[in-house]
Image (cartoon, helix red, strand yellow):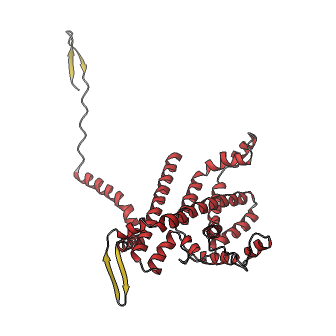
Amino acid sequence: MKETLVGGGGSKIPSARRPAKEPKESPPAATALRRKRVVAITRPWLLLAPALVVLAGLLLWPLIQVGKLSMQDYEVKFGGSVSTFTGLDHYEDLLTSELLWKTVLPNTVFFAVACVALTVALGTLVALLLNRLGPVWRLICSVAVLAAWAMPAVTGTYVWVWLFSPQDGMFSQLAGHLGLIDPETTNWFTERGPFYAIATVNVVHHGFPFVAITVLAGLMTIPKELYEAGMLDGANAWQRFWKITVPTIKPVFLVVTILSTIWDFKVFTQVFLMPGGNGSNEDVENLGVFSYIEAFAKDDYGTGAAAAVLLTLLLLAITVVYIRTLFKQGEEDL
């Protein structure tokens, strides 16, 4: 350590030694560090690669083909097919179609909104009921609820069509005995309002078990002490639901609402299998049925593909909202 003279007395004080420079990282260590970083970045993608390849084959490639088809006039002929590139003509025809804006899109949007609202409301009520039952009755009722979810959409649709069939349907006969309609002349499936009322009941009946079981799982995570504290503060059942239940399991409600929205926007089976829903009545077409009818009933594959692309874009927009909402909720929880 160096010593320096201070003042005239020649006294010496030690001076602070400058810190020695750290030795540079040796080339082998730097190479190992870079390799470790590369492995950390690429390993997740390598693990996901098989699933991504399968998804690309099952989803991405068909989407690309539908996008190409929407820009062509495609004709199926014996021994092959003929296609002519038309650019965005099919999209222009679709977006200027009066049927799309006055019938197809309103049917799709209002039907989906009604189904989502009723499905979430009914599923939540059933979940609250199941949460109040004992273990044995909860198991029995849960199995009964899941039976509606396990029923295929085709079977459920035919059941509801039979219940509302003109003349001899159970609801037609009941309404006739009450003097509300004449079963001999009333057809529930010819007008848009009754048609979609039946379709809504069908979809809600098929979809509420998912909401009920999912919300029940969330309810069972809420500590009972919170409800006891609310009761001590004088909160009634409605106030406890809005002040305790909803804020506590808000992410669960977000998940079931957005997933139900995605599912109900692309409903096809429940509409197509009902009388008039296969294209014979344009007033009851939704976007999924419209796409199918244009492509396979009218052999206008380009317009049908353009409608399918439009529906896909709507679903992608909803999916983006779903993912952003989940991420935002996760950040708020942190």
Residue 73 rendering spot, x and y as whole percentages: 35, 77
Residue 280 rendering spot, x and y as whole percentages: 55, 78
Extreme-bottom residue of the structure: 78
Q: How many marks?
A: 0
Q: Is residue 20 above or below residue 284?
A: above
Look at the image and tell me whether residue 185 can be seen: yes
Q: Is residue 178 above or below residue 42?
A: below
Q: Which corner quadrant holds the N terminus? A: top left
Q: Residue at x 48, y 52 (%)?
A: 327
Residue 270 rendering spot, x and y as whole percentages: 59, 73
Q: Is residue 61 above or below residue 28?
A: below
User: In the rendered view, does 173 fall on the left or right side of 83?
Assistant: right
| Most foreground residue, 113 or 205 | 113
Extreme-top residue of the structure: 8
| Most foreground residue, 157 or 226 | 157
Q: Residue at x 73, y 66 (%)?
A: 141
Look at the image and tell me whether residue 334 can be seen: no
Residue 68 rendering spot, x and y as whole percentages: 35, 72
Q: Residue at x 76, y 76 (%)?
A: 173
Place residue 312 in its image quadrant: bottom left
User: In the rendered view, does 102 fall on the left or right side of 230?
Assistant: left
Place residue 295 in its image quadrant: bottom left
Q: Residue at x 48, y 59 (%)?
A: 318
| Most foreground residue, 242 or 19 | 242
